[in-house]
Amino acid sequence: MNVKLFPVLTIAVLGGALSGCSMAPRYERPAAPVADSYPALPAIAGNTPSAAPQGKAAYDTGWRDYFTDPRLQQLIAAALEHNRDLRTAALRVEEARALYDVQSADRLPNVNANVSEARSRTPAALSPSGKAVVGQRADAGLVIPAFELDFFGRVKSLSDAALASYLATDEARVAAQLTVVAETAKAYYTERALAEQAALAQRTYDARAKTYGLTQQRLEAGASSRLDLRSNETLMETARAAALTLARQRAQAANALALLVGEPVPASGAGTLSALLSDPALDAMSALPEGLPSDLLARRPDIRAAEQRLLAANANIGAARAAFFPRISLTAALGSASPTFGGLFDGGSGTWSFTPQLVLPVFAAGRNQANLSLAETRKHIAVADYEKTIQAAFRDVADALAARTYLGSQVTAQRAIQEAQAERLKLLTLRFENGVASSLDVLDAQRELFSAEQSLVQARLLRTTSAIDLYKALGGGVK
């Protein structure tokens, strides 16, 4: 029985060996459609771009090392665990892995155990003996059903495409993790900035409401004019409107943070944005070496995912080419047969069958050629997608580098404006008390100071989010 099975095993092994062949085109990574270096930035208004910082690359910097605020670390950890987009991305990976396992299973023969019994009755009119005959047969054995001997690599190409799709999905999961880390940090700092601005607006409103009340008393005493009263009222209501607007924006920012984290976020006990991120802290966050654009090919998970999709499209061309050639399959069985179950394993009951089959495509109404054209077109689409992903990554880094170059000086300039406005208000208040300046000058200085204070917080937030964007653009680690 083993001798009779030898041809079956030989052909199966030979088919497995030849399945290493592939008709897929030789893969060559497309050239990166970007410059060899990031754009040089000019000196503007006394700001001279500094030399590129030296240190650990973003890719090698885990998010816990980059974001050192304990509360933010807790929020990011919760987001990585509970965020629904990440759950979906993880399930997509499992789905892709299962599809790959299904496809790769076709590279090995399926072996089924089969036990069956059949009974049939032949009427007397059809029986050679002229009598009704009842037949009975029992079979048991192992069956290899229609195993394709992959001489031209069709099954291997389909398996390679499924593997590349699985790897692309896994890279997309990593990219989603990096996005969640960055967006959680940005939402956290945005909420803190809005909280600081709202508190500033509330303090300003309280001060102006007090001034308005004093002006109203002075008007009743004949020591002030209705113009002063209305001017103070305008400033008070402006601060009130700003406080209400910022309170609404802060609540919405807190809701956005809760959505990213994936669970309710307790009321924040953290400090203001200015307290959380002093200038040295922002300098440290921004001090990431940008490297060369070519480094992004290995660092950015979205680029790696795009290349895996390109590899999948390349492998599908091999499968489409193989469809033009004969398809050879094998069906084999080994077992025993008997008129009754009891005699299945008696001596002399052994059976075997060996059925090779060759299918040669003769006429398919252009189907195979259309499938090949479709596979080639999809590869061209994948190439374009890969190149666009690289270009988008290059722009992300270039934008973040431009922000790093100029936003630090912008924050410094905005702070100088705020300090100058505060000093201007102080001097005008003294002049007003001495009867030299008018109350309108003081009110104008108050308005300008409030605007400068709000702009300083906003500039700090822009610098913070730009540092986070740089970390993400350079493929920051999600370890």
Image (cartoon, helix red, strand yellow):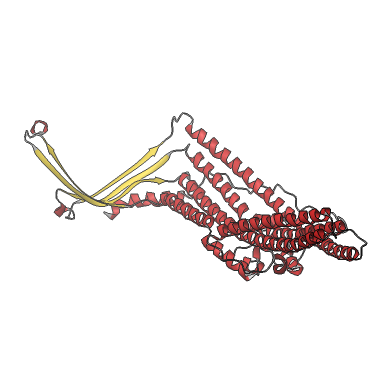
In-front residue for pair 338/18: 338
In-front residue for pair 353/284: 284
As drawn, the residue found furthest toward the front would be 221
Residue at horizontal 65 percent and vertical 61 percent from the top:
191
Please say if 384 is above or below 264: above
Residue at horizontal 61 percent and vertical 56 percent from the top:
252
Q: As drawn, is 300 to the left or to the right of 360?
A: right
Q: Quadrant of residue 122?
A: top left
Q: As drawn, is 141 to the left or to the right of 24?
A: left
Q: Is residue 409 visible?
A: no
As drawn, the residue found furthest toward the left would be 131
In-front residue for pair 392/311: 392
Q: Can residue 257 be seen in this view?
A: yes
Please say if 411 is above or below 68: above
Residue at horizontal 50 percent and vertical 39 percent from the top:
320
Please say if 19 is above or below 56: above
Q: In which quarter of the image is residue 275?
A: bottom right
* Residue 343 horizontal/vertical position (percent): 15, 53
Q: Quadrant for the N terminus, please.
A: bottom left
In-front residue for pair 373/85: 85
* Residue 137 horizontal/vertical position (percent): 17, 46
Q: Quadrant of residue 380?
A: top right
* Residue 432 horizontal/vertical position (percent): 89, 63
* Residue 473 horizontal/vertical position (percent): 67, 56
Number of marks present in the image shown: 0
Q: Quadrant for the C terminus, please.
A: bottom right
